[in-house]
Amino acid sequence: MLRGVTVAAGKMAARLSGPRAGRKNCGKPLPNATVCCKRPRMTRVRSTSRLAALAVPSVGAIAALAALSRPVSLAFLAAFAAGCSSPAAEASAATATTASMTGPGLNDCGPTSNEICAVSLLVTGGTFNRGTDTANPATISDFRLDKYEVTVGRFRKFVDAWVAGWRPTAGSGKHTHLNSGSGLADAAGGYEPGWDATWASYPGAGSAGGSVPSGTSPTTVAGWTTALSCQPGYPTWTSAAGANEKRPQTCLSWYDLHAFCIWDGGFLPSEAEWEYAAAGGAEERTYPWGNTVPGANTSLSVYGCYYNGTGSCTGVTDIATVGSVPAGNGKWGQSDIAGNVFEWNLDGYRSFAAKCNNCANAPASPHRVLRGGSFDSNASYLRAADRDYNNPAYRYLNNGGRCARSAY
Ligand SMILES: [Ca+2]
Ligand SMILES: [Ca+2]
């Protein structure tokens, strides 16, 4: 029985080669992988500055999205063109289908297995306090956040595209609906930089302790299989389509997910956007579903190793197919925001930006933000305000994420 077994902080530092190992996996210990660390203390920056006015979303993003031909983006584009702001339109978009997006992990998601796995739901903008702290207000414009974590089936399409030669272009992946195309306001000044050309060899490369992966990006599915097999017994990826296509893709580095979201016509959510969606905006909920503390089961969230019926983690069956717990959906309908897999955010892990009008801590940081807890976390990680992080090149059994998109 491994319950209660931990790895000393010194070993943790050696394992991750970073000054601040991410607060992960501190709930139920896993066979072969028990890593625990202290919650990092962040310096809060207080500000009395007034928030600037909301940026006006640009419709220019429509043309950019329409130019894409990703199979898994077509439902989103169809909904996008239709206006997609009414509940009926959103529901229609969730079940619209074409032959090109039919398949396991593509159009069989949700509790009734009939939703487009890439459906992206409108999050109505507003103002809230990050961390429920009135010293850290943030204003968020309307945006879309995917209903589901990225499935293995969707990621398989991306791997095929990568092997076929697709690569992100420099500067892509920005919130181009903001600030006349410049994107999110960088806390350090200027705007988010988008994809960096020097990262071209990072997706699919080896896990490493710092910002730069080991090795180089694979050009074969077999190479990706090596990268996505980061922990024996737990990877959801299989070398060919198998039983886990509807489970979230795990073992993703920050670079992998960033590249995926660009390929899929979107971008990584900023930390402020992600928390806004998780907290129900100005409602500032403790958890996406409200303030009810989850019990020792999976009625509200996939966490605590409870999913396959026991309170210990034994393998990939502790990870749920996406959208399996609709009772835990957030205010705008997103599933598994809390739990199942941790979700990479765009931001570097830093103190909150003092002024946040569609802001981000752009990734000039040795770490990136991870949010929401996972299948093996305890309940404290599920809180909308909880902040975690790791090195962007790091791969782990509970790291995945979802994409965000322009609203209009
Ligand atoms: Ca279990
Ligand atoms: Ca999650």
Image (tube, rainbow, N blue to C red):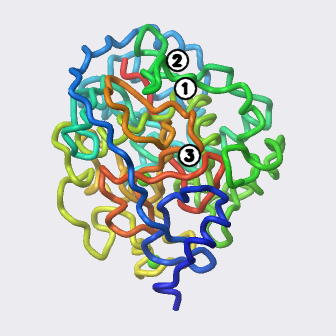
Residue drawn at (64%, 53%) of the image: 394
Residue on which the image places disc 1: 265
Residue type for callout 1: Gly
Residue 148 on image: x %, y %: 43, 45
Residue 333 on image: x %, y %: 29, 42
Does residue 108 show up?
A: no
Residue on which the image places disc 3: 367
- Say which of marks 1 and 3 sits in front: 3
Depicted 277 relative to depicted 105: above or below: above
Depicted 72 relative to depicted 216: above or below: above
Residue 65: assigned label: 2
Residue 139 on image: x %, y %: 27, 26
Of 10 and 264, the residue lying toward us = 10
Residues under labels 2 and 1: Cα distance?
A: 6 Å
Residue 389 on image: x %, y %: 50, 51
Of 148 and 354, the residue lying toward us = 354
Q: Are marks 1 and 3 in contact (CB under 8 Å)?
A: no
Q: Is mark 2 on a helix, strand or loop?
A: helix
Residue drawn at (79%, 30%) of the image: 165
Neighbours of disc 3 within 10 Å: few (<14), some (14-19), many (20+): many
Does residue 9 show up?
A: yes
Q: Are marks 2 and 1 in contact (CB under 8 Å)?
A: yes
Q: Is mark 3 on a helix, strand or loop?
A: loop
Neighbours of disc 2 within 10 Å: few (<14), some (14-19), many (20+): many
Q: Earlier in the sequence, mark 1 or mark 3?
A: 1
Of 33 and 348, the residue lying toward us = 348
